Structures are given as C-alpha cells and as structure tokens.
Image: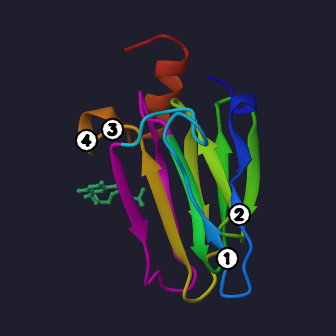
Amino acid sequence: MPLADCRIIDLPKITDVRGNLTFIEENRHVPFGIQRVYYLYDVPGGAERGGHAHKELHQLIVAMSGSFDVVLDDGREKKRFHLNRSYYGLYVCPMIWREIDNFSSGSVCMVLASNLYDESDYYREYSDFQAALRGRP
Ligand code: TYD
C-alpha cells in the first residue's frame, strides 16, 4: 500500500476545564482492530527508533507527551510527519519503512497495532524491503 494511504487521523477530543480527553475505538477511529499497545519512553536525546517495515501490520502512532518526527517511505517517496499533540494519530499501513527521530525530552510515543508482536512480520533490512516491493523473495 502506498504512502498516500498513510495519514494523520484527527482523534476525538472532549475538551474540559478539568482536562481534555481523547479516545480511540478499533475499526472506527482507526481502520483496523487493535490487538497490541506499546510505547517508547525515556528516549535519550538524538536517538532514532524504527528502521524497519512490516509485512502485514497496521499501526497508529501517537505522541502522548512531547514530540517527535516519523519519516515514512514506501520505496518511491518519503514523507516526514511531526507529531506533537495527543489527539493526532499517524496511521501507518503495511509495507512502509519508518524511522522515528527528533524526540523531545520526556516524550512518549504510543503505538496501537493490529497484531501481536511477531518478528517474522518485520523487514529489518532496507534491501529486503526493496526486494519485496519489487516482488522478489
Ligand atoms: P523494535 O520493533 O525493533 O523497536 P523500534 O521499532 O521502536 O526501534 O523492537 C525493539 C525490541 O523490542 C525487539 O527486540 C523486539 C521487542 N518488542 C517486543 O518484544 N514486543 C513488541 O511489541 C515490540 C514493539 C518490540
């Protein structure tokens, strides 16, 4: 699926003087069922995460606190998204190479995922990802 399918999703936000509230429902606010949640935190300055693609996995990436950048690449073009609000989610479809960098101090990157952790779903080498896009094993 191409980069054009990846997009910022504007999540519901219930504003309240006591504090705002955002919620995410599977197959409604995200175009997939949610089987796993994980988060990156205590990220040291200058660190980069990601550096892989998934064969089947759909994900939504949310900056729960602070900010960071996500660079998406479908093998044809690259696009950098800056995430800095907990009511925006970046939907990442399968077969997209992603890098996450530019973490602010204290930032928390939460990811909702459509499947349980499965190492065999990863392309960890960019050359393997490119070969798969060309339809080669
Ligand atoms: P990885 O997906 O490579 O992290 P990132 O893309 O954020 O740099 O995962 C790092 C390690 O954590 C790797 O050894 C696999 C493990 N891991 C799990 O065990 N379960 C999970 O849900 C995730 C996302 C990672």
Which residue is painted at 60% across and 68% down in the image? 63
Classify mark 3: helix, strand or loop: loop
Q: Residue 132 has which mark?
A: none
Location of mark 4 (residue)? 119
Which residue is painted at 40% across and 38% down in the image? 114
Location of mark 3 (residue)? 115
Q: Earlier in the sequence, mark 1 or mark 3?
A: 1
Quadrant of the drawing holding the C terminus? top left
Please report the bounds of the magenta region as a residue range.
35-58
Q: Relative to residue 107, is residue 77 depicted above or below?
A: above
Dot 4 alpha-carbon crowd within 10 angstroms: few under 14, some 14 to 19, many 20 or more: few
Classify mark 1: helix, strand or loop: loop
Instruction: Give yes or no for contact between labels 2 and 3 (Cβ–Cβ under 8 Å).
Output: no
Q: Earlier in the sequence, mark 2 or mark 4?
A: 2
Q: Residue 13 has which mark?
A: 2
Q: Amino acid at mark 1?
A: Asn
Residue 97 in sight here: yes
Q: Amino acid at mark 3?
A: Asn
Real-space CA distance between mark 3 and mark 4, rounded to the nearest whole angstrom = 11 Å
76 part of magenta stretch: no
Q: Earlier in the sequence, mark 1 or mark 4?
A: 1
Residue 19 in which image quadrant? bottom right
Q: Nearer the viewer, mark 2 or mark 3?
A: 2
Q: Earlier in the sequence, mark 2 or mark 3?
A: 2
Q: Amino acid at mark 2?
A: Lys
Classify mark 4: helix, strand or loop: helix
- Mark 4: is the Cβ under 8 angstroms from ligand 1? yes
